[in-house]
Every structure is written in structure tokens, then in C-alpha cells.
Amino acid sequence: MLREIIAPIAIASALVTAAPALALAAPAGAQDEVMTEKVRELHKEGNAHYARGDYERARVAYLAAWALQKRLQIAGNLAEAEMKLGRFREAAEHLAHYLREAPREQPPPPPAEIKAAEALYAAARAEVGALSIATIENGAEILVDGEVVGVAPLPGPVFVEPGMHTVSARRGNRFGARQVRVEKGGEASVELELADGNLGASTKPPPVASPDSAAPAPPASTAPERPAGAARAPVVPVVIGGALGVVGLGVGVGFTLAANAKGTEIDGPLRVGDGSRSACYQSRSAACARLAEAVDDLDALTSAAVVGYVVGGAALAATAGYVLWSRSAGDSEGRAQVTAAPWLAPGGGGVGVAGRF
């Protein structure tokens, strides 16, 4: 049960440590009995961990139950564990769901329980920012910092860490985005207007460079005119080598981005205990199994990225060597020139190859 708040909950240690006592409501029908029994087991496991003060394992068990059924009691217990762990943004999300759905519950939760949830929500909100996002196009997909948070109209505010955030919406080939700053405990309203364009598949708007940061234009070439009779590299080998290099490096960049995302997941949602290796030593818990699987995925992605870089780099090096060698031969049309330059964008990166053949 949501416990009575006995001190300002901005300090999570002010909560009492008794295990949640909320019992799951009876199943709505016979068809829910199997699923509900699994939820009951996970909920009971979470309560046991909470009673021992193992709030991380309690959170993992509650999350597993929450993934199966969005029950009101699970939302409240999950938020309590998250407050203990200082995960105020997640706690605010689950408490907002609790308070939004409580009036529809039959029978409704006791008034004292709702009052406790309101106090806990106020404590969580004091630690994070909130974004009220609106768009005139219902059905548009809403993203915050590139992560999908729902479809318009959203049921409530989106909770974020204090600071600057990019809010965007997309529907088909229509796209709109804005940047907004929100303070700790504050709230910002964002209205998005979608416009036709080719950014519908983008998760982040392209960065806007300030005039001071604009890269200077490359100086005009001062290389002397090549004499007649200089070599011209055959186009096909250069194009094939350059394309292979671009593909290899592109694969490397892609797997690097995927590995970085997996690393963030390991340090975030899949984190176990204090994050040290000993946290899962000889443990067979579901959380440790998911963490081990994620670590294996990270190793595989890192290896694939290395292979991509090696293949791409070797292909570009071989192509450049071939072009340099061909410049020693002569014909009447001049020599080949090839330039390779890396590029990065919000969704990936690679190497651009340009030249004259």
C-alpha cells in the first residue's frame, strides 16, 4: 500500500521501509486468471525484496508485473521503489498514472491512500521537469530527445530531467520540432506545428549551427594545372574501392551507435545494484540474466563495428594507393583526384568520397 508520508519526500530516505501491503484485485474474468496469477507472483516477489531493503530487485519484479498488467497497485508500489532509488522521473510517471486512473477504479482506493500518492507525486515532481506537449494533429507520434513518448493527444505531461530538450512530432512526411528548457520542479508547454517535408522518418531535427561555429569555406585550390599527358585513373576500380570503403566505415559507425545505445541501456534500465560486477556474482535472477544478455550483445556489436572500420579503412587506403600510383602515368586528360571526408548526423555517419576522374 502507498505509505503515509512522514517527511518531505524530496529526500527518499524519509519513506518508511515496510513492504507494500497492497493486494492485487480479483481478476476481471476467468480469461485473466493465468496472467493474473503470474502478476501476483511477481508482485509478491517485489514485496519480499522491498521488505529486505533490496529496492532495485523490488523495482525489477514490479516492472515485470507492470509489463504484463497495468494494475493500479503495481504502479504505486513501483513508484515507491523508484523513489527509494532516486529514480524520480520514472516515479513521477507511475504516480501520475496512479492518480489519473484511481477515480476510474472500482472500488476506488481509500482516500488516505490517494492522499499519500499525491504527496509522493509532489515529492517526485520537485526533482524533475515536466513537458506539456500539444499538436493540432491527433495521431502524430511525439518524441522527446529522439525517444518516442506516445501519440497525440498525450494523456498527461512528459517528465524529463532538468535542462534543454528537443521535442518533435511526426506523421507521415510531416514533421515539426522545437527546443525547450525546463527547470527542476518546473513545467513548460510546447505546441508543435507540423509542416510538409522529408523529415517524417527522422527522430531528431537536424542540429542548427550558430554563425560562429560555421566551418570556414575551404580555400581555393592553388595547385598548378596538370600537364597534358598526366595519368587518368580508370573510373571503375576507384568507384568500387571507394564504395566498399564507405560501406565498411558506415557499418562501423552504425554498429558503434548501436553499441553506445546498448551501453546506455546497461548503465540505465538494466543496471543491477551499484553497477559493479559483483552485483550479479552467482546470481540467477531475471535482472542479472537480462544484464548478461545485454553485455553479450554489447560485445557482439563492438566486434562488428571493429570489423566494419577495418574493412572500410583498408578499402579506402587501397583505393588511395591505386589513385596515387595512377598519377605517374600520362594521357591527355589529366590525373584523378579523390577526397575522403568523414561525416556524422543525428542518425548515423560515414565517409564521403568525391573526386575527379
Image (cartoon, rainbow, N blue to C red):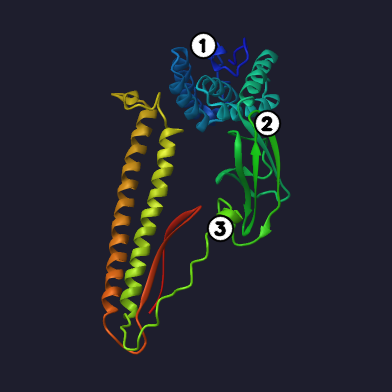
Q: Which residue is mark 2?
A: 186
Q: Which residue is mark 3?
A: 214
- The tally of labels here is 3
Task: In this rendered view, identify the residue nearer to me: 75 or 296.
Answer: 296
Q: Quadrant of the C terminus?
A: bottom left
Residue 244 x, y percent position in the rendering = 33, 66
Residue 266 x, y percent position in the rendering = 40, 35
Residue 315 placement, left or right of 59: left
Please rate how many residues cluster around mark 3, counting C-alpha atoms within 10 Å: few if below 14, some from 14 to 19, many from 20: few
**Which structural element holds mark 3?**
loop
Residue 288 placement, left or right of 153: left
User: Which amino acid type is shown beneath numbered disc 2?
Assistant: Gly
Q: Nearer the viewer, mark 1 or mark 2?
A: 2
> Mark 1 and mark 3: span between their CA atoms?
55 Å
User: Which amino acid type is shown beneath numbered disc 3?
Assistant: Ala
User: Which amino acid type is shown beneath numbered disc 1?
Assistant: Thr
Q: Nearer the viewer, mark 2 or mark 3?
A: 3
Q: Which residue is mark 1?
A: 17
> Picture quarter containing residue 274?
top left
- Identity of the residue drawn at 44% across and 38% down: 264
Farthest residue toward the right?
136
**Which structural element holds mark 2?**
loop
